[in-house]
């Protein structure tokens, strides 16, 4: 490793010329003059070290290169975020990511553990194992590299090129762009309707030896063309010898393009191992009269950060977001940063975020809704409800609506409670049900209210069963 | 139904038959002398008579005082009430007289604190029991404003309530499938939509649906003494008949009902054996159903003036 006397400013020029060679140009830059080295303050040694590792491991792909080089460039001037320096991480302690050196999975997917047998959810499956795309089957699912020349390939290339320009990117988004080896593409052509037959995307992760944290960067691109309707079920889970303690860093990105009049039904379940770190980006672009329905259930990972970014590209969009986070183990951190940007008239959005924090868990919610000048007659509603089940649990809630348009209807509410509603408890008691049973039922229903919105029975039932199990465990440990 | 007033002997030696009680009659010239006097005598005589003629003693409230826990404001100021098996009681009274508080205190609502007096239910001290124990002992209160429980389906709620009871009685818990045949009949009897079972408890229910839902719970879990707090409010005439029909169907020589109402029409459908008038945290008058019709015509003033 070369000394940290680096220069981001000087690097930018050679990088543009030779975009995929971050480590080499960096080494060259390391020998440049001291005056340039003064600018090194903006680049971060740890960030560069990880970026180098990622870049060395990733194979070149012409469709991914514009995105990769843009992210590589961006990483040169991205410091490692700290709670003090970065508003987006003000409440989120990500130091867990620095606790172990990063390792990367080997490039041969065959050596990766086989994912568990799939459920019979639908006819299309995409499987990732430690960030590597193992298989993509079904009418509308394919690996980016396998896409034949034609409409789908062109559209995917355009979307990836657009991602290179993504203005709200952060460190994790760029790490993924630099480190993802292949992209799974769900392409639904114009008018195709397949919401009853969801594309099941499973992400399996296994830990490494324990001396390092294995990082994986899976990436999925979903394109629903004009009038198309598609459902995707995204599941992230750990598989490992020790079942629960596998240590790894999952850094997935899912980009979704919803074209005019299209509809995307998105279910997302995150039940990573308890020692895992999970940093996730979901970006959605919604065109005129499109509909995006999102349900999230996150219960796993020691550190979980989800950036959910939705950008409106045309009028009359409908956006429905329902999310549930449960921190059931000590020191667990669950963070949802959602941003909905409305730039066009008559958008409609409903957001419900619920979280339960047990033990010394920490739940964070930053929910931003921007209603810009031309987004007149927007109807936006946001609600967050938090339950703190122990004196040491912490939640940080920051609902924020930025409204510039003057003819809109916007509501938001935040409720944080240390106890269940005594009236609800009494109603159970008045019917002969004791407090403990009633408490269990009410806690379960608190999460079930979100989970019940998952439109696919097997996924819903599995998430409900897991919720029950985790609540029982956390009650026993109290 | 016990004919409570048949045995009501008129006694001129009643200590309540004091000269003061005749004053208002003279002043207001009410043509209701017989009605207003009879209950006075009955309040003593009827209870003695009931003890002989009616079933086992179910509820005995003596000198009950209770206050709001948070503010300490006293609501109940010495309530006496005796209910035997098979009797139907009605409590009437002005808003704020303590009717609802009485039923809530009886089922152990945490909002209130008992500061004095005794409550015996089937001979056991109710005050020492948790709300769920009171329910399992056979006491049921229909809520005047039923609580919404988002995320818990009506079906699951009813099943939990029934299984709590079965467990207490040493019966095996019913599975969700077995329960269906039990509950669907009850739903039908109340002329409710079967869909009501899949909906979350009271969430988005209309006023009428909530009241029916309370009675559905009563019909599923059963009760020795049902406290029905204004089940007639918010119900249209047809709905009221359905609810009253269901309550009458639950009545047996062993079951009793105590209802709170402001209106005669409920009492026409569920015939009370006793009508109590509550005022300022006390039961000030007890009589038969004619007392209710008297109030219906003359308002509470016409009764109060005799006290």
Image: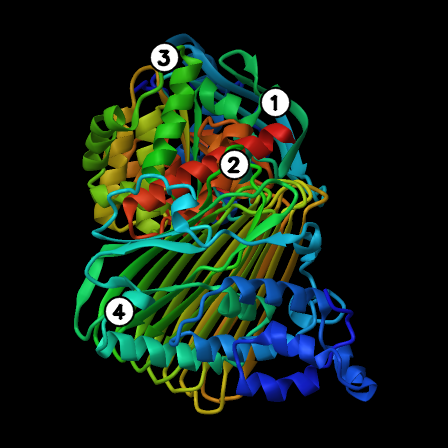
Q: Position of residue B286 (x, y in %)?
A: 47, 30
Please say if B213 is above or below B225: below
Cα–Cα span, label 2 and label 4: 41 Å
In the image, which is nearer the foreground, mark 3 or mark 4?
Answer: 4
Q: Position of residue A422 (x, y in %)?
A: 57, 41
Residue at which label 2 appears:
A470
Q: Nearer the viewer, residue A43 or B178?
A: A43
Going 66% across and 76% down the picture, which residue do you hit? Answer: A26
Quarter of image, res A279: bottom right
Mark count: 4
In the image, which is nearer the foreground, mark 3 or mark 2?
Answer: 2
In the image, which is nearer the foreground, mark 1 or mark 3?
Answer: 3
Residue at which label 3 appears:
B171
> Residues at marks 4 and 1, common chain?
no
| Marks 2 & 4, CB-CB < 8 Å contact | no
Q: Position of residue B137 (x, y in %)?
A: 47, 18
Q: Position of residue A302 (x, y in %)?
A: 61, 47
Cα–Cα span, label 1 and label 2: 36 Å
Residue at which label 4 appears:
A147
Cα–Cα span, label 1 and label 3: 27 Å
Q: Residues within 10 Å of mark 3 (few under 14, many from 20)?
A: few
Residue at which label 1 appears:
B127
Quadrant assignment for the N terminus of chain B: top left
Colouring style? rainbow
To which chain does the residue with label 3 belong?
Answer: B
> Residues at marks 1 and 2, common chain?
no
To which chain does the residue with label 4 belong?
Answer: A
| Marks 1 & 3, CB-CB < 8 Å contact | no
């Amino acid at each position: 490793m070369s000394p940290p006397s680096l220069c981001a400013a000087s690097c930018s020029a050679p990088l543009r010329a030779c975009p995929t060679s971050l480590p080499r140009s960096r080494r060259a830059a390391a020998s440049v003059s001291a005056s340039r080295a003064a600018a090194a303050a903006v680049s971060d040694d740890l960030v560069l070290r990880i970026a180098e590792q990622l870049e060395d491991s990733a194979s070149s792909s012409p469709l991914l290169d514009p995105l990769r080089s843009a992210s590589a460039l961006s990483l040169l001037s991205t410091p490692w975020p700290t709670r003090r320096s970065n508003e987006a991480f003000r409440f989120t302690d990500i130091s867990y990511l620095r606790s172990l050196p990063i390792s990367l999975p080997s490039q041969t997917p065959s050596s990766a553990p086989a994912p568990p047998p799939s459920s019979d959810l639908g006819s299309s499956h995409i499987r990732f194992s430690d960030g590597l795309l193992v298989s993509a089957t079904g009418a509308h699912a394919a690996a980016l590299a396998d896409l034949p020349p034609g409409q789908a390939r062109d559209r995917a290339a355009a979307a990836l090129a657009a991602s290179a320009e993504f203005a709200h990117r952060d460190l994790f988004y760029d790490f993924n762009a630099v480190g993802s080896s292949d992209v799974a593409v769900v392409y639904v052509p114009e008018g195709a309707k397949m919401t009853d037959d969801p594309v099941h995307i499973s992400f399996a992760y296994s830990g490494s030896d324990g001396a390092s944290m294995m990082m994986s960067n899976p990436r999925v691109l979903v394109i629903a063309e004009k009038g198309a309707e598609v459902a995707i079920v995204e599941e992230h889970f750990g598989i490992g010898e020790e079942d629960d303690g596998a240590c790894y860093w999952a850094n997935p990105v899912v980009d979704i393009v919803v074209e005019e009049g299209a509809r995307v039904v998105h279910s997302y379940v995150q039940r990573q191992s308890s020692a895992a770190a999970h940093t996730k980006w979901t970006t959605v672009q919604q065109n005129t009269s499109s509909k995006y329905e999102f349900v999230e259930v996150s219960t796993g990972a020691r550190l979980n950060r989800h950036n959910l970014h939705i950008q409106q590209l045309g009028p009359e969009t409908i956006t429905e977001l329902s999310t549930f986070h449960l921190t059931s183990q000590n020191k667990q951190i669950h963070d949802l940063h959602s941003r909905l940007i409305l730039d066009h008239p008559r958008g409609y959005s409903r957001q419900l975020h619920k979280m339960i924090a047990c033990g010394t868990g920490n739940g964070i919610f930053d929910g931003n809704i921007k209603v810009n000048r031309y987004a007149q007659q927007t109807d936006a509603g946001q609600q967050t409800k938090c339950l703190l089940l122990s004196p040491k649990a912490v939640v940080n809630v920051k609902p924020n609506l930025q409204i510039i348009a003057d003819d809109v209807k916007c509501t938001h509410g935040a409720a944080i409670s240390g106890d269940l509603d005594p009236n609800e408890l009494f109603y159970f008691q008045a019917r002969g049900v004791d407090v403990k049973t009633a408490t269990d039922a009410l806690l379960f229903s608190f999460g079930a209210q979100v989970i019940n919105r998952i439109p696919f029975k097997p996924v819903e039932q599995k998430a409900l069963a897991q919720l029950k199990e985790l609540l029982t465990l956390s009650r026993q440990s109290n | 139904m016990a004919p409570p007033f048949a045995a009501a002997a008129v006694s001129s030696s009643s200590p309540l038959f004091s000269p003061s009680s005749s004053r208002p009659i003279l002043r207001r010239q009410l043509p209701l002398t017989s009605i207003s006097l009879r209950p006075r005598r009955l309040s003593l005589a009827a209870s003695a008579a009931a003890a002989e003629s009616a079933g086992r003693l179910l509820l005995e409230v003596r000198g009950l005082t209770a206050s709001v826990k948070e503010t300490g404001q006293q609501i109940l100021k010495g309530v006496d009430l005796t209910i035997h098996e098979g009797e139907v009681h009605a409590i009437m009274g002005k808003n704020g007289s303590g009717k609802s508080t009485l039923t809530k205190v009886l089922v152990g609502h945490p909002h209130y604190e008992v500061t004095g007096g005794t409550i015996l239910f089937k001979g056991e001290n109710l005050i020492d029991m948790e709300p769920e124990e009171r329910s399992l002992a056979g006491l049921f209160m229909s809520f005047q404003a039923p609580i919404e429980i988002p995320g818990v389906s009506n079906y699951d709620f009813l099943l939990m309530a029934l299984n709590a009871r079965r467990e207490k009685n040493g019966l095996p818990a019913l599975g969700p499938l077995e329960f269906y045949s039990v509950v669907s009949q009850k739903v039908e009897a109340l002329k409710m939509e079967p869909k009501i079972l899949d909906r979350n408890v009271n969430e988005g229910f209309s006023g009428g649906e909530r009241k029916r839902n309370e009675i559905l719970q009563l019909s599923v879990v059963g009760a020795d003494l049902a406290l029905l707090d204004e089940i007639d409010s918010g119900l249209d005439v047809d709905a009221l008949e359905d609810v009253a029909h269901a309550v009458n169907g639950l009545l047996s020589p062993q079951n009793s009902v105590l209802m709170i109402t402001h209106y005669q029409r409920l009492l026409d459908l569920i015939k009370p054996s006793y009508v109590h008038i509550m005022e300022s945290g006390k039961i000030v008058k007890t009589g038969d159903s004619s007392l209710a019709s008297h109030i219906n015509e003359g308002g509470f003033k016409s009764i109060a003036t005799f006290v």
